[in-house]
Image: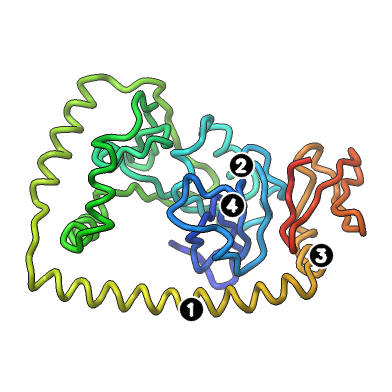
Amino acid sequence: MNIRATDLVLEIGSGNNPNPRSDILCDRYIHDNNQRAGEFAAVIDRPMVAADGYRLPFKDKIFDYVICSHILEHMEDPQKFIKEVMRVGNAGYIEVPSALSERVFGWDFHLWYCEKDGNRLVLRKKQEGEQFNGFFHRLIAQTIWFRRFFEDYDAVWYVRMEWKNRVNMHVVTAPEARWIRELDKKAWKLTQKAKPEFAHDVLFYARWMTRRVKKKIRKEIKRTIWAFNRRLNPGAIIQKLLPRLQCPACRGMLLLDDDGIQCSGCHISYTHEQGIPIFFP
């Protein structure tokens, strides 16, 4: 990602694995972990807000860079969401599972097949849920050789793109049956390459576990410090956020008082939870 040291970075849909470079986090759900790989509360280690992606509580072009990683495939109206992303940011990064990944793993709560066509992101509406009853999900979780295979072909499983000023996106409401058949042929050809290789698997496991342990230690230290600050003075955290925020309903100015966060325009009141503004009236 082409992020400068001075850039102010927002991450939308940060979930349980926020990017280390994100300055401010935004997620709709702070208690519901149904569509996540882990617990959200365990990673709150920097300023964040709870808000609807279709009505973001941020001022126009307030962020230099916006990260949207594994969120677009969940959106019922991706075009509406992307308009909000472009409104609050000047540039950004989008990452989604590839259409091939979607056919192999088949997350039942994902709504779109995603592909990259040149500099354009193409979304095709899914018509089915999970493939193979989660068989490949279990392979990744329980066998190190399939985890190694998955990471070896990282570029195949994900679509990644950066944008500046505008996201070039095209939405197809229903994919052709022929397109699905061709995709399944590619998926079958790729998965045939997955096989155990003892020497490679041992080295991979050692490196993988080392990375995981180091990452977990860094996260836990940062989260513990931030949790202490949130309990000590949550109001101070919100005050620092306020200059970048606006009412998602009327775009009015927001004020913090003893009763919560108040909009000076439409007078809607918003609550907060230990320094996390919640923008659902």
Amino acid carrying label 1: it is: Arg
Circle 1 sits on which residue? Answer: 218
| Of callouts 3 and 4, the N-terminal one | 4
Q: Position of residue 110 (x, y in %)?
A: 41, 36
Helix, strand or loop at label 2? It is loop
Of residues 140 and 121, the one nearer the viewer is 140
Q: How many marks?
A: 4
Residue linked to disc 4 = 90
Picture coordinates of residue 197, whole percent (x, y): 7, 65
How are the colours assigned in the image? Answer: rainbow
Distance from Cα at disc 3 to Cα at disc 4:
24 Å
Query: Residue drawn at (59%, 37%), measured in percent from left and top?
Result: 83
Residue topped by disc 2: 53
**SS at mark 3 in the image:** helix
Q: Residues within 10 Å of mark 3 (few under 14, many from 20)?
A: few
CA–CA distance in space, label 1 to label 3: 27 Å
Residue type, mark 4 in image: Asn
Other-residue count near label 1 (Cα within 10 Å), few / some / many at <14 / 14–19 / ≥20: few
Position of residue 253 measured from the top left corner of the image (x, y, whole percent)? 86, 49
* Distance from Cα at disc 4 to Cα at disc 2: 17 Å
Q: Mark 3: which amino acid?
A: Gln
Q: Residue placed at 86% from the left, 54% from the top? A: 260
Distance from Cα at disc 1 to Cα at disc 2: 29 Å
Question: Which residue is depicted at the point 17% across and 29% down?
Answer: 182
Q: Nearer the viewer, mark 1 or mark 2?
A: 1
Closest to the camera, between mark 4 and mark 1, is 1
- As drawn, the label of residue 239 is 3
Pick the quarter of the image with the N terminus: bottom left
In this view, the residue in front, 27 or 248, is: 27
Query: CA separation, marks 4 and 1?
Result: 30 Å
Q: Residue at x 57, y 77 (%)?
A: 222
Q: Earlier in the sequence, mark 1 or mark 2?
A: 2
